[in-house]
Image: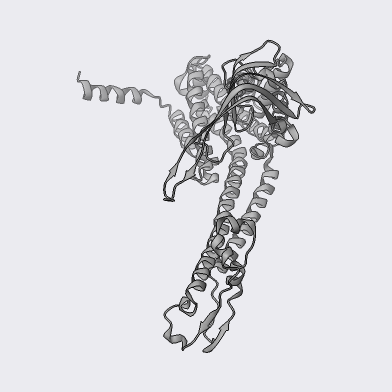
Amino acid sequence: MKKLDKLVIKDFIPPYIMAFFVAEFVLLMIFLWKYIDDIAGKGISLPIILELLFYFGVSIIPKAVPVTILIASVMVFGNLAERYELSSMKSAGISLTRIFLGGILFAIFTSIFSLFASNYLKPRAYFNFLERLNSVKSQKLGLSFEEDVFSKDFRNYVIRFGDIDPNGSDIGDVLIYDHSANDKSKLSLLTAESGSMYTEEENNLFVMELDKGEQYREMVEKTPDKSKHTYPLLRTKFESWTKVFDMSDFDMEAQNFSITRREHDLLNAKQLLVTIDSFDNQILTNSGKMVTNFQNLLEVKDYSDTKVKEEASPLPEKVKAAITKKDEQVKTRNRNVIKSITNPATQYITRDLSQYTSLIETFDTLSAKSIIKASKYLSNKRNDLIRQNEARNKSIQSQMNRCILRYHQIYAWALICIIFLFIGAPLGSIVRKGGYGYPLLIAIIFFMLFIVIDMMGDKLTTSNAMNPIMAGWLSNIILGPVALIITIMALRDSNFSFVKDKFIELRIKVFGR
């Protein structure tokens, strides 16, 4: 290794370490903004909070190292240019690309470290973070309630206590919104003047014994005109009411650390490929079911050989099965079909088939109505199966897209480290400013651009508006040409004076001299 490379690498180490911890600190603020409500006010000790911060900090290393190499490269080559060392090297016949070699080696090392962190450090750290966080959230549930603050600790319920006794048990001015119904727009509210709260059965149940209150429920009532509905309000007064909440949501085994929702963040590249292949097989299997259901829906038997006869002929098996279905769902949703079971329909063909304009003409009126209703039921059932399979395909595709996105982001975040080197190093040589002023400002601008593009790719993938592969490499696709342009400018000893000239020309055109 040449002395020049040793000089550049030696200059890289201090700002690199400083920039890494600055990036980690900034990204850790996301943890405080997002999770502070889950841990505040629960008596959590400082060591546990530091443990959470440590695990979260390790999980965000792949996002922190790109800005690290960007800040370090701008500072190092900005210092070299400011002290005219870069000019001296150029005058000695050393090309700028040769001077950048030490930084390129450092960037390659950072990329390898990013791959290692994404495949080994991040999945384990994020799993431990979720495990510890859910353990914290399940502790001291009563302490999570604050006076006049709405709590969403229990799924589908929003609870507020106007008064909480220091003993942590007695409560007053209770307000509970129930959102467990399918239609979230309907009001379901419970109020009480006072009560008490406690846990029982080894903390598996959370009980509130409420006194002197009222319950308000907005009901749906169908009118004779089925297209219209009324919404009467049901008001119930009570002297005492025992409200029991299941705390299984707080059990780590039941909740499974929210792994099912964030599974793609807990897998390395090899595991992601296996998961993607599994999702692909599920989609193929489900698509096969859709084709079968669609073919069954369109299946038509050939009755062209039916002979003219006076006797009654039996119905096709599918129609007969639809008519004779006796399960509870049909009893409640299609009573007319059940009624037709007691009077099985029969088909009478009294003349040549060419004289009939419709199959239904071969049945009497009562049987025809029964056949139509049964056919409609069978058609709706098949249609529902097709829609369910289609919805399941979309859900599986959405999960697979997230895994594909995360797989490509592992390598995209590693490559962006090298791209940021070719942004930071040329910029440092062009602006000729070291220290913590211009370099830090430039680094923040490009890093914010990287974060915004990355988040945009995530959102577009979630909404199925962009291919996950394209979304994963979006930041590289946008910032790669920028790095190329800035590097060419540095090689040609260009600067940004043309920007100032263009601004002056624009000002003259708009405001005059």
Q: Is residue 433 left or right of residue 250?
A: left
Q: Position of residue 155 (x, y in %)?
A: 62, 32
Q: Is residue 44 left or right of residue 387?
A: right
Q: Position of residue 245 (x, y in %)?
A: 68, 30
Q: Residue at x 54, y 82 (%)?
A: 303
Towards the viewer: 1 or 364: 364
Q: Is residue 450 left or right of residue 197?
A: left
Q: Residue at x 45, y 78 (%)?
A: 361
Q: How many marks?
A: 0
Task: Work out which residue is located at the far right of the displayed protein and give it.
Answer: 202
Q: Residue at x 30, y 23 (%)?
A: 503
Q: Is residue 477 left or right of residue 250?
A: left
Q: Residue at x 54, y 80 (%)?
A: 347
Task: Work out which residue is located at the far top of the displayed protein and give it.
Answer: 166
Displayed quadrant of residue 489: top left
Q: Position of residue 317 (x, y in %)?
A: 61, 74
Q: Is any atom of residue 24 visible in this view?
A: no
Towards the viewer: 5 or 262: 262
Q: Eyeballing the image, is 154 above or below 164? A: below
Quadrant, the N terminus: top right
Q: Position of residue 104 (x, y in %)?
A: 59, 31
Towards the viewer: 471 or 441: 471
